[in-house]
Amino acid sequence: KSKMATGAIPAAPAVNVCVEAVLESQIQEVRVVEKQEAQDGQEIQEIYAPPLSMSENLTKLAQKIDFYKDESGEKGKPTSEGEKEREEEKSVAAFQPSLWPWDSVRNKLKTAYTEMSVLLDVLNIAKEKRYMVLDSVQQSSPDAKLPLQLMSKKKALNSASAILLAGAERLKKSQAENSNKSDFHFELLKLRQNWRLKKSGNTILGDLSYRSVGSRYPHNSTFEVVKSTDLVGESGETTPTSTPRGSLEVIIPSELEGTAYIQVEVKSVPESLDLTGAILKMPSGLGAVHTYWQQKLEVAQNVLFCKEIFAQLAREAVQSKSSVPHLVVGNQIITNIFPGIQLSIVLCHSTGKEKDRKIPMSPGKLDHNHVLEHSLHQLLREVHNKNLRFPAPHPVTAMVGVSKKRRLAGPNALSRRELVEMTESDTMLNQIIKQTKHNVLRLRTLQTIDAFATSLNDPQLTTHWSCANNSLEASCRVFITSQGYDLRIWHSFVLMIGVDSIKIAHKDGRIFNLSFEEKELQDFILWQIAQHQTSVSQNLARMMGWQIMSMCAALGVSDLEDTGIASSLLLASPDHDRVLAVKSGPSSGVKVFVQSSQKDTNGKTQTLSADNKWQYIGADFKEVDLSKFEGKNFASKLELLMATLSRSVS
């Protein structure tokens, strides 16, 4: 009213103003098109980008906001004079004392309530999605020029691969140069990894012996390491199969040069027939030998190993007090293990300089005995182990080397014989002799059983050798069967072959001890074959209804057998009108007799009783010619004979 009174012009009514973006589309691309009708021949075309939707526009504007910018400091600064005045009024009002003591607490609670309300609204909007939905809008990317990108990537990969190939080629050349170039210190490092070396003054010495594992063989085993300038060899030529020399050379003693091996042979003395044998030499194929000096040292160490074994065996042969003397002549040890069987151990050492003296190998030798070869290695390792390792003393103040069994000899009250056996130990030579004896005895047993199996058609022999054997013991089971009757009628026994004796376990529990003689085993097998034929007759009689009148396992009324004892069996037919007598002997074989009736020449019975069962009493027995009967073996022929004589069957 005051303004109207003063004559002021009244204000116009309020007008709503809408602020919007320009609806012009942005130009995306400008193209120049050639036209033939136009004078200038060209036309410019503008390609506009499509307008943004509301969601895309909101996304574009939101991307312009920097949410990481801290504007807390700028909010406190006044930007105009009015704001400065309001800030001054607030500062003055801030110093006014509060009228209510809980005014500050109320203000803080109100502020917290406001913030919690805002947080609840934000959670409701984000969870229920009915107030506002935020869709991610992908910006339209410009058209990628794929061929250009592919060309650029291919060019980059080609340049990178060229760099890598060049580096790999340089590494290959460097590696080839280092491998061809022999370095003395590098080879010395490889030599030290496998052999024991020490430096004495300006000389580098090495050791080839087995002293580190318990060897006490006093032989010169020192080699010298020197620097060599001959990279090819003494002849100056290299072959594809020869090992090239490096810048390192080893000088070994002259006694260890060349090659050596130990040859063990078992022969029969009169016939000079090789029974078994073994050759102890350096095993081949342990690994690829890349250097000349490595191969040279391994060969020299093998020579030392063979010499140590032979020296140990020769020393034990000289010191032995056995009943069979051992003969040591030069590089050969000769001993007799069985009558007519000779064991010889020969050390063969060739330095390559002698050409006339050569020890020829026996062309008629049997297969190589790998067990005996392994035993030679193992026995020497055991000697080294005993020299290096001793039983621990109990208590600690006791003497070193006393075994536990010897410590307990007093509390266990061992006898003098047991104490003597405890102190005695088999030498290396005695163990080799025992293993050789066992091999010969097992070979004899095998040949004897095979000879019977191939020569006999009735009955048949089958042998099953056990795989759970060792170097001094072996076992096998022998089955005696008749063809066609092996399911019900069979005979068996077990052979346990030891060092110089054979133990036989019969199926009825009896134990037989045989010596190393082949004749004893042959006689026993023949006796078992005779017993088997008697058992076959007895079982057939039971199956066919014949009655066993008597059985004698040791017949003493007939002619004596060359080997063993004969057995007999008397059988009566089911009607008791026929009598069969079966005699089985180891040397005479199987014979069958039939008792004839007591009738005179006129056909009248000479017995007082009219019953037919008494007409065979006191009658003579006639032998049956089994060769005229049909059948493959004795069992089938005897079965046919019983069926013919049995009146019930006929």
Image: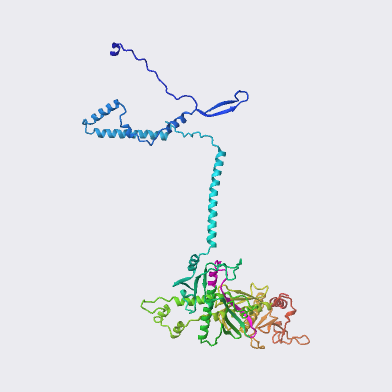
Name the residue nearer the viewer: 304 or 283. Answer: 304
Residue 589 location in percent, x, y?
68, 82
Residue 428 location in percent, x, y?
51, 80
- Magenta span covers which residues? 270-298
In the image, residue 150 above or below residue 373: above
Question: Can residue 503 be seen?
Answer: no
Residue 282 on the magenta span: yes
Quarter holding the C terminus? bottom right
In the image, residue 83 above or below residue 166: above
Residue 446 on the magenta span: no
Quarter holding the N terminus? top left
Residue 196 location in percent, x, y?
47, 71
Q: Is residue 375 left or right of residue 539?
A: left
Image quadrant assignment for residue 352: bottom right
Name the residue nearer the viewer: 175 or 643. Answer: 175
Residue 228 location in percent, x, y?
52, 69
